[in-house]
Every structure is written in structure tokens, then in C-alpha cells.
Image: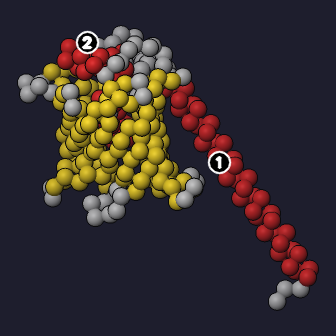
Amino acid sequence: MFNRKESRLLWIWLAVAALALDLAITAFVLWRAYKRRRLVARLRQPFAEASQGSVPPRVRAYAEAAGAVVEAGKLIRIKQSCSLRFQPDQSWHELKAESLVAVQQPGFIWQGSIKAGPLPLVSVVDAFVCGKGLLDARLLSLLPLAQAEGEAADLAEAMRYLAELPWAPDAILQTPGLTWLEQADGGFTVEAQTASGPARVTLWLDENGGRVRAENRPRAVKGGAVPTPWEGRFWNPQRIGQRLLPSEAEVAWILPEGPFVYWKGRLLDYKIDF
């Protein structure tokens, strides 16, 4: 048993440790908020190419039917309710997420969190900004779980951005730096440059939504990344905020044993912001 003096010292040390932890957490939260503000500021920067490439008539018609308009210098804010799993035999985790999509350049910042009660158990940031990709996943917003930058992240995040253009019709109409090519089967290959070379996906669009495919999106595996076929689909058009958009989507890795659907989501809101 501790005597009175030892007990008092123990409580003092515990109080000091708790204060130090609280200060460390506060400092880290402020640092992450600062980094996010810098990332958003970079997302607003004009693309090196001032002019926009030609948008095929059917793609332009899709964006205009959704109600898209040209509002230069703005960001698109999209709110989502999502489900995510990391392996085919694992259970789904529910997330609330928000995505900022640029119109000044090809780019986005996506933030989502898996909560345990009111607390964010796992927080994730996916981004493609100024030609570079970023993944940052943390436990309790502090401890790193997964981080990625470099060539694989550049290409993977750029492909995600391109694949989600059906959810950002305003970006379709005005974002510079996108190259469109119509395919014989009715699809459209869209390409964006990254710091690690061109990234491209193929979109098939119709009045109900559509689908997307990339033949070689980098997939994280232990020790690196493997180019893997990747597909997604959009459906159930609804009036979402300011636009008429497919309200639901899912994406899957196409593995040798079959498709692995690992993400599915529903749009909650869409607006032109900032």
C-alpha cells in the first residue's frame, strides 16, 4: 500500500501525464487541421493548362441533364453515407464521409470516419491534389494504420477521381486537364496527368447512372501495390441537393476468384461551396 505522501505524488504524476496527453492530442488535432487547410488551398489552385479539353457531346449532355453549371473557382462539396470492408470475408463498417471536388484542376479530398459511439475510431483521408495522391488512415485520429504517397498513390487516387466524375457533373463541364476519347462500344475513356504519368478509366453513362472500369488500378498488398482490374457502378438517380445524380454506387476489385465489392455508398447532399 502507498502511504499518504506516495499517493499524493502518484496522483500528481497521473495528472501531469493526463495533461501532457491532452496537450499532445490537441496539438496533433490542430496540426492536422492546418494540413487540411493547406491541402484545400492547393485544391483551389488553377491547373497549369488554362484551357479545358473538348468534352464529348454525350458526356456534356449527361452533365447538363444533371443540372450542372459553370461556376469557376468554386469547389463541389459532396456528403456520403458509406460502407467499407477490407477483406471479402470481413463484415462491413459504416462511415459518414465528405468529398471536396475541384473545378480548377483535376482533384479531390475525401474524408471519412468509422465511429465507435460518438468517437472516430478510424479516420481516413484520400486525396488527389496538384497531380499527387495521398492516403492517410489513422486509429483514434492519432496512430497511423495505412499511409501511401508516391507513384502507386498518384495513379490510384487519380483513377478514383476520374471514376467519380459521374457524381461531379459540374467538374465534367469545366475542369481543365482532362482528355476524353470515345470508344467503339459507347464508353468514354477519360485521362488525367499525374506526377507519375497518365491515369485513365473508362466510363459508360446513361440516364440511370452507368459504370466505370480501370484495367490496372494499383491495389495495396503487403509490401507494395499490384495493378488490378477495378470496376464500379452507379444507379438510382435522385434529386440530391442541387443536382439530379445517381444516388447509389459500389466499387469492386476484380480478383482471380471473382469480384470483391469493398465499398458502397449513397449520396446525402451535393452543393457548390467556397
Q: Answer with left or right where residue 122 lies relative to residue 237.
A: right
Q: Is residue 195 visible?
A: no
Q: Residue at x 44, y 14 (%)?
A: 71
Q: Residue at x 32, y 32 (%)?
A: 238
Q: Residue at x 36, y 52 (%)?
A: 84
Name the residue beneath numbered marker 2.
54
- Front-lying residue, 191 or 89: 89
Classify 205 as above or below 115.
above
- Looking at the image, the residue that sits furthest to the bottom is 1
Classify 180 as above or below 162.
above
- Front-lying residue, 85 or 30: 85
> Regarding mark 2 in the picture, which secondary structure is present there?
loop
Q: Is residue 83 visible?
A: yes
Percent position (x, y) of residue 253?
Answer: 23, 49
Percent position (x, y) of residue 62?
Answer: 25, 21
Name the quarter where the C terminus is drawn. Answer: top right
> Regarding mark 1 in the picture, which secondary structure is present there?
helix
- Front-lying residue, 45 or 264: 264
| Residue type, label 2 | Ser
Name the residue beneath numbered marker 1.
28
Closer to the chain start, of discs 1 and 2, is: 1
Name the quarter where the N terminus is drawn. Answer: bottom right
Q: Answer with left or right where residue 212 lies relative to residue 138.
A: left
- Front-lying residue, 234 or 185: 234
Q: Residue at x 37, y 51 (%)?
A: 83
| Residue type, label 1 | Phe
